[in-house]
Image (tube, helix red, strand yellow):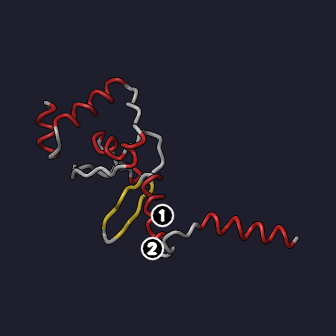
Amino acid sequence: MRQADIARALGIRDQFVSNVVRREASDSPAPARRDELDKPYTETLQAWTQIGEGGRVVIPAVMRAALGVQVGDTVLLRFDDGELRILTPRQAIRRAQELVRQYVPEGVSLADELIAERRLEAARE
């Protein structure tokens, strides 16, 4: 199948397919830049796959690349509102930080508060 046909079928840019194919062919993933890891992937990707032996699911290469994961990486699976979601550790941490941020007033450092509490406890001993 041509790269342009793959891109059209998945509804993504040809260049993205080309980058994934080149990376897969070289067997050495391109190092991700720090700023690329912090940006969420915004294009919609979708693909059909089958449930294999033992409940295994194959994540297509283009989606693994969009997530920034490779074979052997750890991901978090989350069943939420009838959908199975896959999060990288970085995404899970970011989501946890967003949840905690709702309850911490602006300008308050939880780390500084924890250090201050530990120093008080140490001074009492």
Q: Quadrant of the C terminus?
A: bottom right
In the image, what residue occupies the spot 15% across and 39% down?
7
Label 1, secondary structure: give it. helix
Q: Where residue 83 sits: x, y (%)?
A: 31, 65
Q: Is residue 76 left or right of residue 67?
A: right
Residue, far top: 26
Dot placed on the residue nearer the N-terminal end, 1 or 2: 1
In the image, what residue occupies the spot 40% across and 37% down?
33
Question: To which quarter of the image does residue 29 belong?
Answer: top left
How far apart in space, not on screen, are marks 1 and 2 (Cα)?
Answer: 9 Å
Label 2, secondary structure: give it. loop
In the image, what residue occupies the spot 28% across and 27% down?
22
Q: Is residue 75 above or below residue 65?
A: below
Q: Quadrant of the N terminus?
A: top left
Q: Where residue 84 sits: x, y (%)?
A: 34, 62
Q: Is residue 7 above or below residue 118?
A: above
Q: Where residue 71 sits: x, y (%)?
A: 43, 39
Residue, far right: 125
Q: Amino acid at mark 1?
A: Gln
Q: Amino acid at mark 2?
A: Gln
Q: Is residue 60 above or below residue 94?
A: above
**Residue identified by numbered label 2:** 102
Considering depth in this image, is 22 or 36 the residue closer to the camera? 36
Question: To which quarter of the image does residue 3 belong?
Answer: top left
Residue, far front: 107
**Residue identified by numbered label 1:** 97
Considering depth in this image, is 30 or 103 the residue closer to the camera? 103
Considering depth in this image, is 123 or 57 the residue closer to the camera? 123
Q: Is residue 36 left or right of residue 107?
A: left
The circle drawn on residue 105 is none
Circle 2 residues within 10 Å: few <14, some 14–19, many ≥20: few
Total labels drawn: 2
